[in-house]
Structure formats: structure tokens, C-alpha cells
Amino acid sequence: MFTGLIQKMGRIAALERMGGSGSLVIEADEWDRPIQLGESIAVQGVCLTVTHYSEGRLTFDVLGETFRCTNLGEKKVGQAINLERALRQGDPLGGHMVQGHVDERGTVAAITPVDRDHRVEIHCTPELLQHVVFKGSMAVDGISLTVAAVDEHGFTVHIIPHTWEVTTFGEMQVGDAVNLEADPLAKYVEKALQGNHPLLPVRWQEVQQGGYDKLQRDD
């Protein structure tokens, strides 16, 4: 489990493809506690397992399905990568609950400077868009962000200067693919409302159609 608060920005040192699967090697500064083999790290928002660590180099095995469903297969040697180690008991939960299970690849549609900040518009599929709500949470390349606007094509986020500097947003360009993971809570709510549970007074289709007043039972 992760929070979407990026701890380090590494660089791809090697990317090998062997048939569909492959391996990824990332260079990063030393961590505040030793890296353990087998531990989970979110790499661009993708939960991967450390298979080797030596002199600042992290090695991960990557499945073909992971390459297909995320933007890792499009990355090149030297490109920046967002990194976050898994939560430990007692760690602060500063972002939102992120599983590292990417739902789909979105596309950066526009990047616009707004005073000190940047407004980034991201397009996604209608299937993912149903989990996106105004002022809700979305993980973009592993970064926990607040949705500032939603339209029929996707959603918009605002990036403050600190996030711009310490994550891959600073190198992002229009047309880039980004890994998107919706808030897991939205998925559980949809799952519950899609069923026919007798204690639920409203169905997911009604929520999508604006039947929010039906969420409250009549006494």
C-alpha cells in the first residue's frame, strides 16, 4: 500500500525486454533505511518487487501485462521515474490510499502555466471517468493529486511548484502517456451499488444519472 507521496525521483539505467516481459533498472540516491530484497516499491505508480539492489541501483522484473497496461514499456534510458516505498505501520498517510494497481494509461492533453502553478489536463476512457469526481483523488504516475475539474474527455489537476520540481511532472510533455489509478474507495462503492443488496436504497446507475437524493431513505 502507498500514499502517492513521491519519496525520490530516479533515472532509468537499463530497460530490457525479453519477449513480452523484461527487467527495469533504476538509479536513485541512497534511502534513509536499507532497501530489502522482495520489498514493494511504486515505480511510476506501478507496484513492483525489488529483485536486486546494489550501489544505488534497483532492479525489478516486469511482466508483459505490466508493460502493456502502463507507460513503463514506453520509457527510455535516462528518463526520470517516480519512486515510493510501501507504507510501514506508523507512517503518515499524507496523500490517499494507492494500491499500485494501474487502471489504464491516460494521455496528457494540455499543460498550462497558471501563475506559479501548472494546470494539466488528462484524457482517459469513459470507464475510468466514472470513478473520477470533482475534488476527489487520483494517482497520476504514482502521485496523489486532487481533481480540479472533470469533463467528458477526462479531468484536470493543478501542480504546485514543489510537486513540479520533485516529480516527473517537470519533464512531462503534451501527448505523454501517464499511469492512472482511481481512488479504490470509488471502485468499492460502485461494486456495492451495482449489486442488488436489499439494504442499499440506490443503484450505481441512479448515482451516475444524478439520483443523489435517493441516497437518503425516507423515514
Image (cartoon, grey):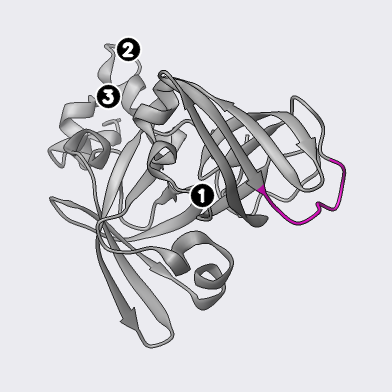
- Position in image of residue 168 (x %, y %): 49, 60
Q: Nearer the viewer, residue 95 or 84?
A: 84
Asked whether the beta carbons under mark 2 and mark 3 sit within 8 Å of each other, the answer is: no
The amino acid type, in three-letter code, at marker 3 is Pro
Q: Which residue is mark 3?
A: 201
Say whether residue 151 is left or right of residue 52: left
Q: Which residue is mark 2?
A: 197
Is disc 3 surrounded by few (<14), some (14 to 19) or many (20+) residues within 10 Å?
A: few
* Extreme residue toward the bottom, this view: 115
- Position in image of residue 140 (x %, y %): 42, 50
The local secondary structure at tag 1 comes to: loop
- How far apart are labels 1 and 3 at the CA level? 52 Å
- Magenta residues, as a range? 27-34
User: Which residue: 45% across, 64% down?
Assistant: 169
Residue 31 covered by magenta stretch: yes
| Mark 1 / mark 2, whichever is N-terminal | 1
Residue 200 appears in view: no
Dominant secondary structure (helix, strand or loop) of the stretch shown in magenta: loop
| Disc number placed over residue 77 in the picture, else none | 1
